[in-house]
Amino acid sequence: MAKVLEVKGLSKKYPKKDVFAVENVSFDVEEGEIFALIGPNGAGKTTTIRMISTLIQPTSGDAEVAGYSIVKEPSKVRENITYLPDEAGAYKTMTGRRYLYFMAGLFSGDKAVCEKYVRRAEAICGLGDRLNEKIGGYSRGMIRKLLLSRAVMTEPRLAVMDEATSGLDVINALEIRKMIKNLAKEQHMSFLLSSHNMLEIEYLSDRVGIITGGRLMVTGGIDELKERYNAANLEEVFERVVLENEVR
C-alpha cells in the first residue's frame, strides 16, 4: 500500500533549554493503517504530532503527508490532514447541525460541497435528531462523536488524534474506537493516534511506535512486539522499552 505519512529524521530543539524535545524520529504510516505513537509524559509525542500537523516547525528533518513536505508545502499538507487534540471543544450555543455547517464552511465556499461534508458527518456521528439540540446540553461522549465526525467529514488522507477517548465512559469509548476502525477499513483513511490507554492502543492499532526521551526506540505490530519482548500485553512491552532506555 502507498505511504500516506513518511517522517524522516524529524527533530525539534528548544534553544532556551538547549535540549531536543524530539531527536531524529523516523517512521511511516500506510494508507488505511492505524499507527499509534506512545510514550511517557514529556517523551516528545505531542511535539512530534504538532510538527506533523504543521503547528510548529521542526529544527531539522522533514515529514511528507500525501507526498507534501511539512516544511516546504505546509498549506498542501493541511489540505490532506485533520488534527483532533484532546482539549478540542465545540461552540455550546450552536446546535450540533449548525456547528457542522459552520465548520464545513471553513473548508469550502461551495454550498454543494458543504452539504456533502455535513451529510457525511451526520452519518458518521450517529447522533440523529440530537443534532438539532444545542451542544451545551450534550454529554462528553456526544461532543466527542460530533468532533470526530467534523474532523473526518472532508475525508482527509491522514487523521491525527490525541487521546481520542479521554474521559469517556466504556460504552462511548467503544463507539469512538469502532468509528475509527470503520473509517480505516471502509474509507482507507490513515490514522496517527496518541494515547496513554494501552488497552485502547492494543485494540485499535495496526502498528505502534514507542518514544521516550525524544527518541523513537521501537516500532512494530502488537503481536510482533509482544513476542520480541516476551510480554503478555502492550503495557509490559511499553514498560520494558521505557525502563531499558532509562538504564542506558
Image: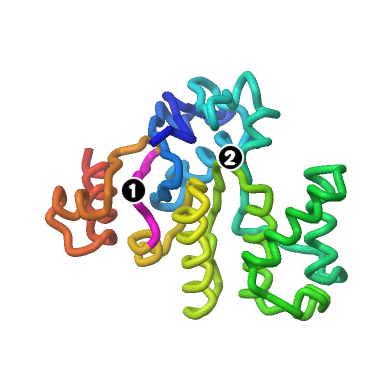
Using a 10 Å C-alpha cutoff, classify the residue at mark 1 as few (fewer than 14 neighbours), some (14 to 19) or many (20 or more): many
Amino acid type, label 2 = Arg
Secondary structure mostly taken by the magenta-highlighted segment of the chain: strand
- Which residue is label 1 attached to? 207
Display colour scheme = rainbow
Identify the image quadrant of the C terminus. top left
Picture quarter containing residue 88? bottom right
> Which stretch is magenta?
204-213
Which is nearer the eye, 20 or 135? 135
Residue drawn at (85%, 65%) of the image: 98
- From mark 2 to mark 1, how far is it between C-alphas? 20 Å
Q: Is residue 37 visible?
A: no
Q: Is residue 217 visible?
A: yes
Provide residue 236's location: percent of width, then percent of height.
Answer: 23, 60
Left or right position of 133 against 122: right
Q: Which mark is residue 124?
A: none
Which is nearer the eye, 162 or 115? 115
Residue drawn at (59%, 28%) of the image: 16
Residue drawn at (69%, 57%) of the image: 150
Provide residue 202's location: percent of width, then percent of height.
Answer: 33, 61
Picture quarter containing residue 119? bottom right
- As helix, strand or loop, the secondary structure at mark 2 comes to helix
Provide residue 180's location: percent of width, then percent of height.
Answer: 50, 60
Which is nearer the eye, 219 or 117? 117
- Which residue is label 2 attached to? 50
Amino acid type, label 1 = Arg
From this view, report whether residue 176 is shown above or below residue 88: below
Identify the image quadrant of the N terminus. top left
